[in-house]
Image (cartoon, grey):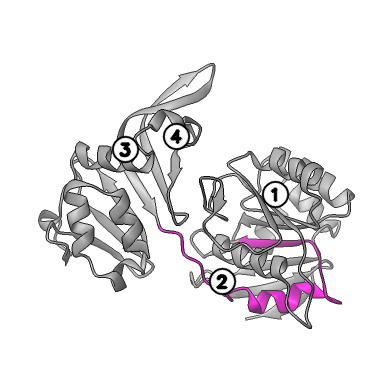
C-alpha cells in the first residue's frame, strides 16, 4: 500500500504526519510537494491540500507544516539506501524511483561539467509522484486499435495530466498478456526513459506491464528503442512522450523493420500534432494506423476521438 512505502521512505516529522493521514486519503494522492520552509502540499486529482503537523487537512497556509532541510535529508538517505552516490545516474536526471514504482523528483543546485549535468547538490525540494495503476482503463481503446486480432501502430495524443502514461501502461499490460478470443499476447519492449511506465526498482518493474514485456529503464528513448529491437526481438515497441528528432529517426527504423509501435505525445488535438515537424509528415503518410486523442477532462483512459490512418473518425465521444 502507498502508506507503507511512504513510511519506509520518510523520517522524522514527515513520517509522523504520514502515519496520521488516513489510508483512504493517501490512495487518492497523486503528488506530495516537500519544499524547505514552504508549506507541505498534497495534490489529488480533485484539489490541493495543505497538511498540518497533526496529519489533518487545512486550507489555511499558516496552519500547514513547513518542512525543514532535515526532512528532505531523511527521505534522500532512505530512498538511496544511505548511498546517494550509488544513485548518481538517477539523481542527475532529477529523480529517484522507490519501491512501488513511485518517483521522487529532485531540485537543487545543478553541477554542470562539459555542458551536461553531473549531479544535483543542495537539494531543496522534492516532489513525490505516486504511481497509480488503473487496470482495464484501456479496454475502450483496444476495441478500436485491434484489427483482425492484431495490433498496429498507435499514437496516443494527450493534454497534460490526462492519464496518458497510465493508459499506455495498461495497453502494454494487455497487449503483453493477450485476451482470449480477441488477440494473442505479444512480446513488448518498453523504452522507459523516465521510469514512469514500469516504475522499476532494483531493476524489477513495480507496475504490472504484462508477462511478455521487457523494460529498458532510464535509457534515452531513441537509443532504448533501437537497443530493444537488437536485443529482445519485440513485436511491439512502447515509448512515452516522443518529441525529439532522434525519436522519430528511431521510429522510422522500427516501422521499416515491421515492428509495431505504441507511443504517446503531448497535444490538444489532431490539428495540433499535424503541425509538428516530422510527425506531421508521418501522420500524412499513414505511419500511424490509429491516432487516439484523449479527453481533456483528466479522467484516465477517457477518449475524445479516434482516427484511422486515413484520418477518418472511427470513434467520437
Q: What's the mark number on residue 276? A: 1
| Disc 3 and disc 2 in contact, CB within 8 angstroms | no
| Disc 1 and disc 2 in contact, CB within 8 angstroms | no
Q: In terms of secondary structure, where does tag 1 sit?
A: loop
First reached walking from the N terminus: tag 4 or tag 1: 4
Q: Nearer the viewer, residue 197 or 275?
A: 197
Q: In terms of secondary structure, where does tag 4 sit?
A: helix
**Distance between mark 1 and mark 3 Cα atoms:** 42 Å
First reached walking from the N terminus: tag 4 or tag 2: 4
> Which quadrant: the N terminus?
bottom left
**Distance between mark 3 and mark 4 Cα atoms:** 13 Å
> Which quadrant: the C terminus?
bottom right
Q: Residue at x 15, y 52 (%)?
A: 65
Q: Position of residue 228 (x, y in %)?
A: 75, 45
Q: Position of residue 168 (x, y in %)?
A: 62, 63
Q: Is residue 153 magenta?
A: yes
Q: Single out the mark in the foreground, 1 or 3.
A: 3
Magenta region: 130-157
Q: What's the mark number on residue 77? A: 3
**Distance between mark 1 and mark 2 Cα atoms:** 20 Å
Query: Circle 4 is placed at which residue position?
Result: 91
Q: In terms of secondary structure, where does tag 3 sit?
A: helix
Amino acid at each position: 500500500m502507498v502508506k507503507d512505502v511512504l513510511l519506509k521512505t520518510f523520517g522524522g516529522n514527515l513520517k509522523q504526519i504520514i502515519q496520521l493521514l488516513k489510508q483512504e486519503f493517501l490512495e487518492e494522492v497523486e503528488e506530495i510537494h516537500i519544499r524547505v520552509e514552504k508549506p507541505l502540499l498534497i495534490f489529488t486529482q480533485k484539489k490541493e491540500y495543505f497538511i498540518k503537523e497533526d496529519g489533518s487537512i487545512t486550507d489555511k497556509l499558516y496552519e500547514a507544516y513547513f518542512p525543514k532541510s532535515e526532512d528532505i535529508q531523511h527521505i534522500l538517505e532512505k530512498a538511496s539506501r544511505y548511498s546517494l552516490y550509488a544513485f548518481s545516474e538517477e539523481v542527475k536526471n532529477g529523480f529517484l524511483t522507490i519501491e512501488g514504482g513511485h518517483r521522487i523528483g529532485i531540485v537543487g543546485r545543478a553541477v554542470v561539467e562539459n555542458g551536461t549535468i553531473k549531479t544535483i547538490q543542495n537539494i531543496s525540494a522534492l516532489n513525490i509522484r505516486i504511481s497509480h495503476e488503473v487496470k482495464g482503463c484501456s479496454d475502450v481503446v483496444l476495441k478500436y486499435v485491434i484489427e483482425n486480432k492484431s495490433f498496429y501502430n498507435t499514437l496516443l495524443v494527450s493534454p497534460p495530466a490526462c492519464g496518458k502514461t497510465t493508459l499506455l501502461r495498461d495497453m502494454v499490460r494487455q497487449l503483453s498478456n493477450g485476451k482470449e478470443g480477441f488477440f494473442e499476447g505479444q512480446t513488448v519492449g518498453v523504452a522507459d526513459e523516465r521510469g514512469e511506465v514500469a516504475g522499476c526498482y532494483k531493476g524489477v518493474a513495480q507496475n504490472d506491464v504484462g508477462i511478455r514485456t521487457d523494460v529498458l529503464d532510464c535509457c534515452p528513448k531513441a537509443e532504448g528503442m533501437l537497443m530493444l529491437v537488437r536485443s529482445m526481438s519485440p513485436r511491439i515497441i512502447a515509448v512515452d512522450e516522443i518529441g525529439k528528432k532522434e525519436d522519430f529517426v528511431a521510429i522510422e527504423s522500427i516501422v521499416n523493420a515491421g515492428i509495431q509501435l505504441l507511443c504517446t505525445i503531448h497535444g490538444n488535438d489532431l490539428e495540433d500534432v499535424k503541425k509538428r515537424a516530422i510527425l506531421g509528415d508521418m501522420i500524412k503518410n499513414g505511419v500511424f494506423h490509429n491516432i487516439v486523442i484523449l479527453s481533456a477532462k483528466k479522467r484516465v483512459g477517457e477518449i475524445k476521438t479516434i482516427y484511422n490512418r486515413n484520418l477518418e473518425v472511427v470513434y467520437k465521444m
